[in-house]
Image (spheres, grey):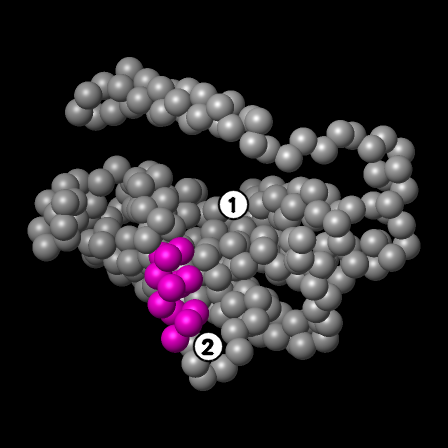
Amino acid sequence: ETIFGPHYAFGLPGVLMAIATFVFWMGRKDFAHIPPRGKAFFVDTFSKENMIILARLASIFSFVILFWALFDQIGTLWQVQARELNRTLPDWIPLFGGMEMLAAQVSAVWNPLFILLLIPVFSYFIYPFLERFTEITPLAKISAGLWVAGFAFAIVSIIQIQVDAGYTPSVFWQVLACLVLTAAEVLVSITCLEFAYTQAPNSMKSVIMALFLLTVSLGNYLASGLKFLLVDSQGQPLLLGADEFWFWTILVCIAAFSFKFVASRYNEIDHFQ
């Protein structure tokens, strides 16, 4: 946008989305088309047995809601912090060295890039290596992801301490925190999506997938709700600067500790299709 103007900034994503839509339309004959079942769908989905399964999964999803409350602040709280950083990347970084970033580019650029890099790294290297020594269950991955998210927020909390002291740290440290947070996303989001699918019976798979996506929305509501509550009688925030970052860090660490006990009581039932 800064170099080429807004018409390129908006036009290029629009063209790419049009191409993606066309490619999706071309594959319409290869998709499985399941006709609507009407009332029978609701009878099966909301049966007593399925409601029990849903309640058990809700205990797992509640922690994912908190994860999204933290993760999506990469586009809000982290951006506010990025405005106070030295946003020129170190020269030794390939391709991007010496470039000055916009405050919003940590989430808009680095997170998608790190996702594409980390998914195969975890799938083909980290998970197989760890499985040589112990069984890596989906719940263990989610638990680890919550701790990793806490570590990512600890990094930005330390950065904010430096900012509050009047220093101007390099944005590189926030990019590093983004890498760690993206690793947590791989551990929590992707794993939980797969886990929820295997735990849902055939008649509930679409409902469970929808409820999983609902956790993203609820996570944002949770974040905004907590921010709304953490104000004084004058409407001013009670937590400022590094205190706010440490609040979220401690909160997710408490959740990670609690998840261990919830996961230990969860009996997995494989409904893989």
The location of residue 13, given as percent across then percent down, is: 35, 25
In this view, the residue in front, 187 or 62, is 187
In this view, the residue in front, 85 or 15, is 15
Q: Earlier in the sequence, mark 1 or mark 2?
A: 2
The location of residue 207, given as percent across then percent down, is: 72, 44
| Residue indicated by mark 2 | 131
- Mark 1 packing: few (<14 Cα in 10 Å), some, or many (20+)? few
Image: magenta residue range: 118-129
Residue farthest toward the front in the current orientation of the protein: 29
Q: Is residue 173 left or right of residue 218?
A: left
Name the secondary structure under disc 1: loop
Q: Callout 1, which amino acid?
A: Gln
CB within 8 Å, label 1 to label 2: no
Q: Is residue 271 left or right of residue 124?
A: right
Q: Is residue 213 left or right of residue 53?
A: left
Q: Is residue 113 left or right of residue 240?
A: left
| Residue indicated by mark 1 | 236
The quarter of the image holding the N terminus is top left
Q: Callout 2, which amino acid?
A: Glu
What residue is at 51 percent from the left and 54 percent from the top? 190
What residue is at 43 percent from the left and 53 percent from the top? 240
Q: Is residue 226 visible?
A: no
